[in-house]
Amino acid sequence: MFSKILSAGISGIDAFIVDVEIDVGKGLPTFNVIGLPDAAIREAKERIKSAIQNSGYKFPNKKILVNLSPADIRKEGSHFDLPMAVAMLSSCIELSEKKLSDCVIVGELSLDGRIKKIKGALSIAIMAREAGFKSVIVPHDNRNEAASVEGIDVFAYENLSQVIKALEDGEDMKPHSVSAQASGLDESRFDFSDVRGNYFAKRGFEIAAAGNHNIMMIGPPGSGKTMMAKRLTSILPGPTHEESMEISKIYSCCGMLGGEGLMLARPFRSPHHTATKVSLIGGGKDAKPGEVVLAHRGVLFLDELPEFDKKALECLREPIEDGIVSITRLKNSACYPASFLFASSMNPCQCGYFRHPSIECTCTPGDVRRYLGRVSGPILDRVDIFIEMVPVDFESISTRTCEESSRSIKERIYRARKVQGQRYKTENFSCNSQMSTSDTEKHCSLEGEAKDFMRMLFEKYNLTTRSYYRMLKVARTIADMEESEHVEIKHLSEAFSFRKAYYSYWRA
């Protein structure tokens, strides 16, 4: 007897439809799976057999052949357990063809018939809706993320028996609904009101958040670099619904999405400096996403930047510049979104006290040059804002001053983002940092004294073409924060003040 169940596979962070075809016929009892299955799928036969028997059903003691179509695409994951079990039982139990014809089924089975949580349920629900299917059956623990997709009915069950009973004729299936809840970093833990002094640095962070500009801090240990970086997401505007879907798809496919539903907080990723190229960019035999992908629409913070492996750092060029990362491996290849705000921090030398006002540096000039040289020119050229962090004095720490909260800073940033949103409403981007060269020339045109001032800076400091355009984008953001239609000298001057640390350390 032949039967077919609709299911789905995962490639990267996107899903594709898979037809689970089963033929239960006469012959010696065998159970074979074809259609390029991985080891987890090949092992499913034992899980399925035990799950069916422990759910009170009789396992067909016949010749069973399972085909996963299309047969030329490799299938991975244990979420094919449930559709294969349903297909087998449909050969001996009468199930509703009407319900099965428009329903995508996914889920991993335990030996006692319980349905376990899977990766990529959100991507599968999105694919099912876009393909025109009416419903999807997912594990109970995946119910909220799948139900966040509008336009498709989501049915969530805890065990195999519930699924079979729901698919029988005459049974009503009640779709699951969920209200969006926050999942991700708890922003209330980190607030800029905790940061004493360092007002120049705070201004730099505000500009970076307003235009989504890359930022680098350089300063001695204990000057507040990491503390400020951790508070960056607290002043970033929350993601739009589309951005939340993008973020949640990535975390769902990586098995890192909580049970609350969509992620409504921007991700903050801070890998250790011992991180490898594969953990940063992604890779492995299955081309899995790395930290740059997990930071999509959020912040990627690299603390102690020179301590990272040089080859790993150089691989950041493409995602920082283009917002995507392409991974090609023998068995698989994938292109992932990786549009993030790049934040980094570093000490000025190995001991950390080069140019410290009160602590003597123990490094030689050669040591300092070699340490700074660990960060290459192409990486530095992709940074928009450089901040030299200075030690906070005793008065700033001990005096009880009312520092500005993240909430009030965020309100100003929201207004600046609103200005950008209006300007770019017909474009395919929304922030100043995302402008192409032609867009920058269009929206950051300089005239008169402003043009002469920029020419002076360009010639005096030997700006590269990339740094020239990046500086213009920062100036445009400062102008937006002041609700100025044109980029003026004062905006260019402040934008350049956030590049002085670069010339002080790397061009001195």
Image (spheres, grey):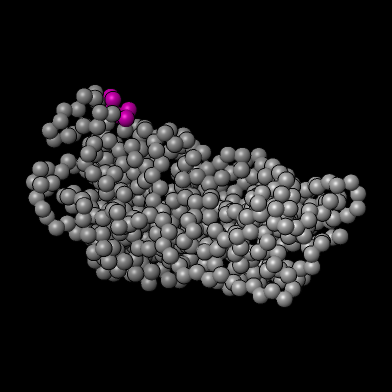
User: Main SS of the magenta segment?
Assistant: helix
On whether residue 368 falls in the magenta region, the answer is yes
Identity of the residue drawn at 70% across and 48% down:
47
Q: Nearer the viewer, residue 473 or 140?
A: 140
Quadrant of residue 92 within the rendered picture: bottom right
On whether residue 444 falls in the magenta region, the answer is no
Farthest residue, direction right: 27
Query: Is residue 171 in view?
Result: yes
Task: Say above or below: 5 vs 507.
Answer: below
Residue 461 place in picture, x, y as percent: 27, 44
Q: Nearer the viewer, residue 378 or 144?
A: 144
Residue 349 place in picture, x, y as percent: 27, 31
Q: Nearer the viewer, residue 10 or 198?
A: 10
Residue 417 place in picture, x, y as percent: 34, 66
Q: From the image, which quarter does the N terminus lie in?
A: bottom right
Say whether residue 201 is left or right of residue 125: left
Identity of the residue drawn at 35% across and 34% down:
306
Identity of the residue drawn at 46% across and 70% down:
179
Quadrant of residue 271 within the rendered picture: top left
Task: Say above or below: 496 vs 3.
Answer: above
Task: Say above or below: 443 vs 362.
Answer: below
Q: Nearer the viewer, residue 348 or 379?
A: 348
Q: From the image, which quarter does the C terminus lie in?
A: top left
In magenta, the rendered stretch is 366-371
Report the label total.
Answer: 0
